[in-house]
Amino acid sequence: MVRTLLVRGMLTGILAGLLTFGFLKVYGEPQVDIAIAFETQMDLAKEAAERAKGVAVQGQPELVSRQVQAGIGLFTAVMVYCTAFGGLFGLVFAFAYGRVSGLLTPQAVSLMLAAVGFVAIYLVPNLKYPANPPSIGDPATIKMRTALYFIMIAISIAAMIGAFALRRLLIVRFGDWNANFIVAGYYLVIVVIAGFLLPAVNEVPQQFPAVVLWKFRMASLGAQCILWATLGVLFGASAERVLAAGRVRAAGRVRA
Amino acid sequence: MTSTTFVPAFPVPVIPVRELLPWAIFAGLILLLAIYFVGAEEGATSLISGMYVHEFVHDGRHLLGFPCH
Ligand SMILES: [Zn+2]
């Protein structure tokens, strides 16, 4: 059963990846191109200034062409990312189904996990450390920025898991509905405190066009919405078939 | 449509943890490693030398929300 759910999760992830890639190709790549043009301009201006001071400047060789980066490179990255998340989604579903709430249908569990995953893994961490187009980050701070981003994701996921554990305890006393609001509040308090304590990162150059930054971040957000919505809806339908088949077999055994 | 939508009247059986654990560990680790290669390899940390992986997945890394450059 776990193997089937894992495979179905990855297959759903592949489908979500195709949709996400199409969306990013159309709405994301133009912003990346503008950002890289901006970066090239800034680099050229800097080089000219260095040369004027008499410093020898060496350009960096291009390892992968822009065409490859924006084509097969983007496709590979998105497909690997989405397929992997699909598989993880299947595994989390295998654990959550029947445990989160014994009365929820597979479709409902899948939708709820997708909503929760989107909020905990992308939305909340990105409100603190938003996605940035090329030319924004300082290469010298990449270690720190990556560490902070993953710390924020880890705190967010841990707070979400904690919220589900807390929910189990609260349901008896406050009922299903009220427990949801209490643990949502608990999750928000934890991530707001974490966001407040973790250092801010803002390396956007003064002259960087605000519209490009906005469109880039919206493209990034849109891609994640497509990924998680596809996982939530299609995996639920797919899992329901597997689980229904299992129930029919079990019922057959009981009758025999 | 009754075969594809159902509302269980009683709690459904759960998949036991001992059945889940090996999958969670092996498949989970491989999947996380795949995400790591898209998101952070040859950026903050490096398992493979050079910058080819970073440059190849570069646009995806930015658009998927990971810190890059
Ligand atoms: Zn970059």
Image: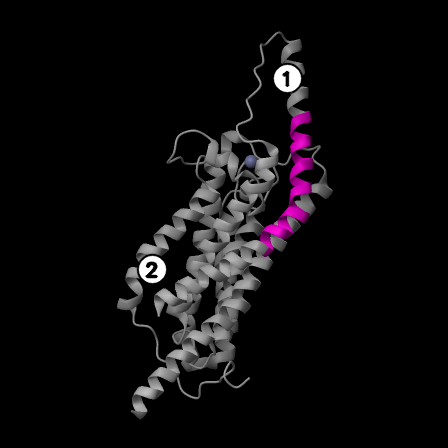
The boundaries of the magenta stretch are A19-41
* Quarter of image, res A8: bottom left
Residue B19 vs residue A180, the one in the foreground: B19
Residue lying at 44% horizontally and 82% vertically, measured from the top left: A103
Is residue A36 magenta-colored? yes
The chief SS type of the magenta part is helix
Same chain assignment for discs 1 and 2: no
Q: Is residue A165 visible?
A: no
Describe the element under mark 2 as helix, strand or loop.
Answer: helix
Mark 1 and mark 2: Cα distance apart in space:
51 Å
Residue picked out by circle 1: A47
Q: Residue at x 29, y 63 (%)?
A: B21
Judging by the rendered image, the residue that carries numbered circle 2 is B24
Which residue reaches farthest left?
B18
Image x and y of residue A183, in percent? 48, 69
Query: What type is the residue that disc 1 sits on?
Result: Glu
In which quadrant is the C terminus of chain A drawn? bottom left
In this rendering, which labeled residue sits more in front, label 1 or label 2?
A: 2
Q: Along the horizontal axis of the image, is A221 left or right of B4?
A: right
Question: Is residue A237 depicted above or below A140 in this figure?
Answer: below
Residue visible at 48% across and 72% down in the picture? A109
Q: Amino acid at mark 2?
A: Ala
Residue A213 appears in which quarter of the rendering? top right
**Chain at tag 1:** A
Which of the numbered marks, if any, corresponds to residue A25?
none
Q: Position of residue B54 (x, y in %)?
A: 49, 36
In depth, the one of A47 and A70 nearer the eye is: A70
